[in-house]
Image (tube, rainbow, N blue to C red):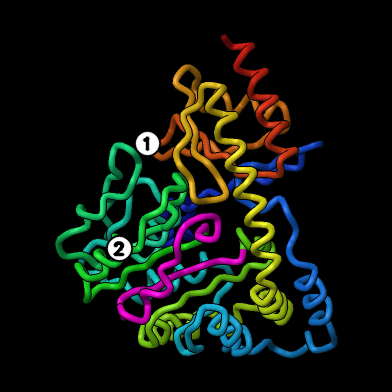
Amino acid sequence: MSRFWNRRVRALHPYVPGEQPRLANLLKLNTNESPYGPSPKVLEAIRDAASDDLRLYPDPTAADLRDTIATRFGTTADRVFVGNGSDEVLAHAFRALFHDGAPVLFSDVTYGFYPVYCGLFEQPFRHIPLNDDFTINIDAYTGDCGGIAVANPNANTGIALPLDQIEALLKRHPDRTVIIDEAYVDFGAQSAIELTHRHDNLLVVQTLSKSYALAGLRVGFAIGSPELIEGLIRVKDSFNSYPLSRPAQAGAIAAIQDADWLADITARLVASRDRLVPQLQNLGFQVLPSCANFILVHHPEHKAGAIAAALRERAILVRHLSTPRIQDWLRISIGTDDACTRLTDVLRDILSSRS
C-alpha cells in the first residue's frame, strides 16, 4: 500500500489477465485468442490508414464504423456505441447505466471484470449462484436491483441462454439496464441484438477480439436504445473523446464487412471444439457444453492446478481460475486441430504418469 493511493484504489482488487509469457514452442490456450489471423482485408485497411493522416485526431464519433456496425446488424447508428475493446465499453456501461442505490446482479461464475468495475465505481453488487449444472438461474434474478449483467455465452462456462429467458429477464426489470455481454456469441449462441428494438433497457455488448481474431486491435461495441447510447457517450466524452485510433477504426470496418472470413474461421473453431470434447472425455474429463471458443473441464481424479502446472512444464498454457465454484476446473481455449492434438497427446502422457 502506498501513502499516495486514495481510499478507492486501496480497496481495489484488480482483474488478473491471462498469462502472456515468452516460452519457446509455446501453445497458448489460456486467453481465448483466435489461433487464426484476421481477414487480409483488415491488414490492408490498417496499412492504408497508417499514413500521414496519423498526425490528425481520429473521428471522435467513429461515424463510419458505427454506420458499418448498424448496417451489419440491421439497426441505426444512433443505437451503436464503440470503444477501446469491450472491456472499456462495459466499464462505461457500469458507470453510466447502473443505479447505485441497489446492487447490480450477476452470476457467481462469470466474467471476472464485473466485480472489479463495481469496486472501482463503488457500486454494490450481489452474486446470483449458478444452478448445479452451471446454467444461469434466471428465476433468481428478482427484487430491486441497480441493473443486471449477463455474459452470454457465460464467461468461463461457455453455456448460453436462449433468447426467451433473456426476454423474460428484460420484462421482469423494465426500469433497469440489462447488459448482455456477447463476447463469444459467434461460436454457437444466438445474439440478443434483435431484442434491443423491443426493449429499451437492453444493452448488447460485443467485441472484435475473439471471433474476428483482433484481440490486438482493441475494438468493442454496444447496441441499444438511443438513450442508453447517449449515456455511454456522456461518460466516454468525460474520460477520453478519442478511444479508437484511425487504424483501429479502419481495421474494424474491414473486419465487420468481411462476413465470409468471420464465417470461415468461426466454423473451423467450432469444428475443432466439437472434435476435442470427446477426446477429452475419453481421457476421463468432464466437459461442460460450450457455445464459446473455449471449454471448461474437470478431471475427478486429478487436481486442476497440478494438471495446469504439468502442462506449463510442456509449454502449454491453460487457465486455472480461482473462482470458488470452478477452482478445480480448467478453462481451455480452442486452437487449431494440430494444437488440440498436441494438447491431448500431452494430457494423455501426464495422466498416465500419475495413475
Identity of the residue drawn at 43% across and 86% down: 234
Q: Where is residue 50 in the image (x, y as percent from the top left)?
A: 82, 79
The quadrant where residue 71 appears: bottom right
SS for callout 2:
helix
Q: What stretch is highlighted in magenta?
A: 184-208
Give the residue number, with chain letter if any, for mark 2. 164
Q: Quadrant of the C terminus?
A: top right
Above or below, 228 relative to 136:
below
Identity of the residue drawn at 51% across and 55% down: 188
SS for callout 1:
helix
Above or below, 112 relative to 53:
above
Q: Where is residue 85 in the image (x, y as percent from the top left)?
A: 57, 68
Q: Are marks 1 and 2 in contact (CB under 8 Å)?
A: no
Give the residue number, with chain letter if any, for mark 1. 324
Q: Is residue 185 magenta?
A: yes
Q: Position of residue 149 (x, y in %)?
A: 35, 62
Instruction: Give the residue type that dot 2 points to.
Output: Asp
